[in-house]
Image: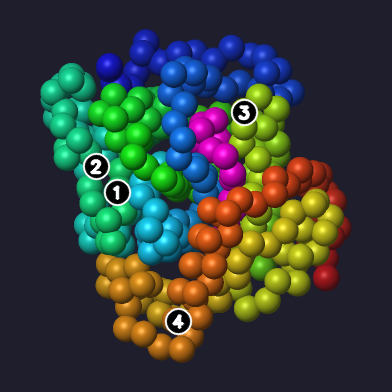
Amino acid sequence: MNIAVSPQRLRVPSRSHEDGEGSVQVHLDAQEKIGTAKVFAVYGKGGIGKSTTSSNLSVAFSKLGKRVLQIGCDPKHDSTFTLTKCLVPTVIDVLEGVNFHSEELRPEDFVYQGYNGVMCVEAGGPPAGTGCGGYVVGQTVKLLKEHHLLEETDVVIFDVLGDVVCGGFAAPLQHADRALIVTANDFDSIFAMNRIVSAIKAKSKNYNVRLGGVIANRSASLDQIEKYNKATGLSTLALFPDLDVIRRSRLKKATLFEMETSPELEAVKLEYLRLAASLWAGTEPLEGVPMKDRDIFDLLGFD
């Protein structure tokens, strides 16, 4: 397998309607399907707290006795930072080290064990302007399958770059059972969420992925989120307030489950455990009807 990212190596996506009107996307090989694990893809506006949410959700699943793999899909490769206590090398990094001869790699070269046994992989990304992030995600899954690392995994969580919804960074949706959107109770976050809903709806035409729901983060209330949910058919799965302990956990390279306890932190941990249990039991798929940009401004932008 060669993961070198160059125009010559990329499969050039054809312009078609297979994944939605006017779609230009990278289509992954059917052999890359992830086995029997439950797969969740976490999206949301850049800086909204997706990595914090993903990492603590991974720990919550592990606390329920599940075998968890978290895959970071951001070139800055800090998705698993609080789990591993460091910035681990990316798949691109380790392949470059063996001149892209993947057969020379061992699992321990690119899979790292984090807190409470959560297994961590950082896919990384191509150099800016030179390749497709979706190709990197697809090749990462191939590498995991070649080493049989998905066969004994119960839960896979993709933590996906910002609010980018191009064909490349929508690639985890081709693997996921449920897409989860992290948002705050504000206009900009909800506007980004609406675009992500459109991307998920396009992918759901030809893949198994469905909207799982909304995770409200850094929010004291839900009034704007619920107003949007009512208009689009979404629902809120969990609410995490804007607490200083959450900010400090990132600075301490720790998940919330490792921080010094307090009543407010215990409530947040219980909410993560409740969310994990709910997702494991199975959430009803949401249709989700995205709004036109103008309609979002009319709904939320001029109060």
Label 1 near label 4: C-beta < 8 Å?
no
Q: Does residue 164 belong to the magenta stretch? A: no
Above or below, comparing residue 61 to residue 185 in the picture: above
Q: Dot 4, crowdedness within 10 Å: few (<14), some or many (≥20)?
A: some
Q: Report, in whole angstroms, how far the alpha carbon at label 4 lies from the one at label 1.
A: 24 Å
Label 1 near label 2: C-beta < 8 Å?
yes
Upstream in the sequence, badge 2 or badge 4? 2
Question: What residue is disc 1 on?
Answer: 119
Upstream in the sequence, badge 2 or badge 1? 2
- Write the start and end of the magenta stretch as one range: 169-184
Q: Dot 3, crowdedness within 10 Å: few (<14), some or many (≥20)?
A: some
Q: Report, in whole angstroms, how far the alpha carbon at label 1 lies from the one at label 3.
A: 26 Å
Question: Is 251 situated left or right of 234 in this image?
Answer: left
Residue 169 visible in image:
no
Q: Is mark 2 on a helix, strand or loop?
A: loop
Q: Residue 207 bears which disc, if any? A: 3
Q: Report, in whole angstroms, how far the alpha carbon at label 2 lies from the one at label 1.
A: 7 Å
Above or below, comparing residue 97 to residue 24 in the picture: below
Q: In the image, residue 150 lies at what x, y percent? A: 35, 35
Q: Residue 266 bears which disc, if any? A: 4
Label 4 near label 2: C-beta < 8 Å?
no
